[in-house]
C-alpha cells in the first residue's frame, strides 16, 4: 500500500470524524485548532506496528540420515594365542661328587688250579698236533697203555723226534711231566746203548733252553708199562713261556730196542694242587 493511499484513507477518516464531532457538538475552536492541522497536514502515517513477522518456517534441518552404523564385521575372535609356558630351564644337576668307593683290600685270590697242557696226550686222535720231525714213528693200536692208540719208537740205527709246542700258564707255581712206556730190547741190560727220552725246552724270546730230560735206557725195566713222573724246576720263571716238548728215540746200529709210548702229559698247578 502506497503512502499516498494511506494518507488519503486517513484524510477520509478525519473528515468523517470531524463530521461526527460537529454533529455531536464537540467541535470547538480549540478542538479545531488540534485537529485541523492534522487534517490539513494529514495525519502522520502511523508507523505500522510491525506485524508479527511470521516465523520463518523452520528450515528443516536435514534430519540426519541415519548413517548406517556399520554392522560390525565379525571380528575374528582371537584365537587363543597359546601362552608359551616356559619350558623349565633345566637346573644344572649337580655334578655328582664321587664318593670314593672303598678301595677293596686285595684279598689274595687263592690259586687252586691244575691243568694238563699237552693236546692229544694219548695219541687217540692220530699224530696231530704232534709233529714227527725225524725218523719213523709208528702210530699203533697194539701195545697201548690207555685208549686204543700209542706211538712206537725204536729200531736199529734210528733217530726219531716227535714234537709239540705248549705254553706255561701265567699262574703256574709247579709243574711235572708224565709219560707211560713199555720197552722191548735185545740190547744190554747193564750198559746204555739205546734210549728214549722226553725233553722240554724253553723257547722264550727265541731261545732254546733245556728245562727237562727224562730218559729210559735199554738196560731199564722191560715188558711192562711204567709211568714216569718228572717235576720241573723253577716253574715261576717259565710263566707264559712257550715250551717245546720233544719225544726222542735213539738207537745204535745193533740190538734193537723198542718203546711203546702213551699218555704224555705236562701238568702245571698252583696252590694246593699237585701237578
Ligand atoms: Ca693211548
Ligand atoms: Ca723207528
Ligand atoms: Ca741198540
Image: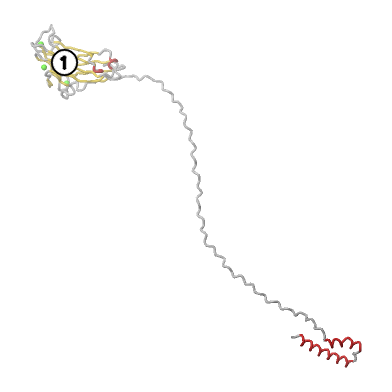
Q: Quadrant of the N terminus?
A: bottom right
The quarter of the image that holds ligand 2 is top left
Q: In which quarter of the image is residue 234?
A: top left
Task: Give the image's coloring scheme.
Answer: secondary structure
Q: Is residue 223 visible?
A: no
User: In the picture shown, does residue 194 fall above or below 120?
Assistant: above
User: Viewer-proximal residue, 40 or 216?
Assistant: 40
Q: Mark 1 sits on what residue?
A: 248
User: Viewer-proximal residue, 151 or 166?
Assistant: 166
User: Viewer-proximal residue, 16 or 113?
Assistant: 16
User: Viewer-proximal residue, 248 or 106?
Assistant: 248
Q: What element carries label 1?
A: strand
Residue occupying the point 64% across, 72% down: 61
User: In the picture shown, does residue 95 fall above or below 111?
Assistant: below
Residue occupying the point 86% across, 90% down: 18
Residue at far right of view: 29
Category of crowding for the residue at label 1, using alpha-carbon neighbours closer than 10 angstroms: few (below 14), some (14–19), many (at least 20): many
Amino acid at each position: 500500500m502506497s503512502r499516498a493511499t494511506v494518507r488519503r484513507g486517513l484524510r477520509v477518516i478525519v473528515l468523517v470524524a470531524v463530521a461526527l464531532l460537529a454533529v455531536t457538538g464537540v467541535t470547538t475552536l480549540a478542538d479545531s485548532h488540534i485537529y485541523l492541522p492534522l487534517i490539513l497536514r494529514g495525519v502522520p502515517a502511523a508507523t505500522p506496528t510491525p506485524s508479527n513477522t511470521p516465523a520463518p518456517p523452520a528450515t528443516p534441518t536435514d534430519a540426519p540420515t541415519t548413517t548406517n552404523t556399520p554392522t560390525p564385521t565379525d571380528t575374528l575372535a582371537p584365537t587363543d594365542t597359546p601362552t608359551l609356558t616356559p619350558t623349565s630351564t633345566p637346573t644344572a644337576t649337580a655334578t655328582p661328587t664321587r664318593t670314593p668307593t672303598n678301595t677293596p683290600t686285595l684279598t689274595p685270590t687263592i690259586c687252586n688250579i691244575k691243568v694238563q697242557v699237552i693236546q692229544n696226550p694219548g695219541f687217540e686222535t692220530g699224530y696231530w698236533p704232534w709233529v714227527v720231525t725225524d725218523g719213523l714213528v709208528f702210530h699203533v693200536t697194539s701195545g697201548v697203555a690207555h685208549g686204543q692208540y700209542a706211538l712206537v719208537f725204536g729200531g736199529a740205527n734210528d733217530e726219531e723226534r716227535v714234537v709239540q709246542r705248549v705254553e706255561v700258564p701265567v699262574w703256574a707255581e709247579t709243574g711235572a711231566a708224565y709219560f707211560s712206556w713199555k720197552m722191548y730190547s735185545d740190547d744190554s741190560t747193564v750198559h746204555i746203548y739205546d734210549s728214549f727220552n722226553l725233553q722240554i725246552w724253553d723257547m722264550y724270546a727265541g731261545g732254546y733252553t733245556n728245562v727237562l730230560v727224562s730218559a729210559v735206557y735199554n738196560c731199564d725195566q722191560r715188558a711192562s708199562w711204567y709211568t714216569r713222573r718228572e717235576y720241573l724246576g723253577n716253574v715261576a720263571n717259565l710263566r707264559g713261556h712257550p715250551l717245546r716238548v720233544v719225544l726222542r728215540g735213539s738207537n745204535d746200529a745193533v740190538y734193537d730196542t723198542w718203546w711203546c709210548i702213551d699218555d704224555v702229559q705236562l701238568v702245571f698247578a698252583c696252590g694246593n694242587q699237585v701237578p
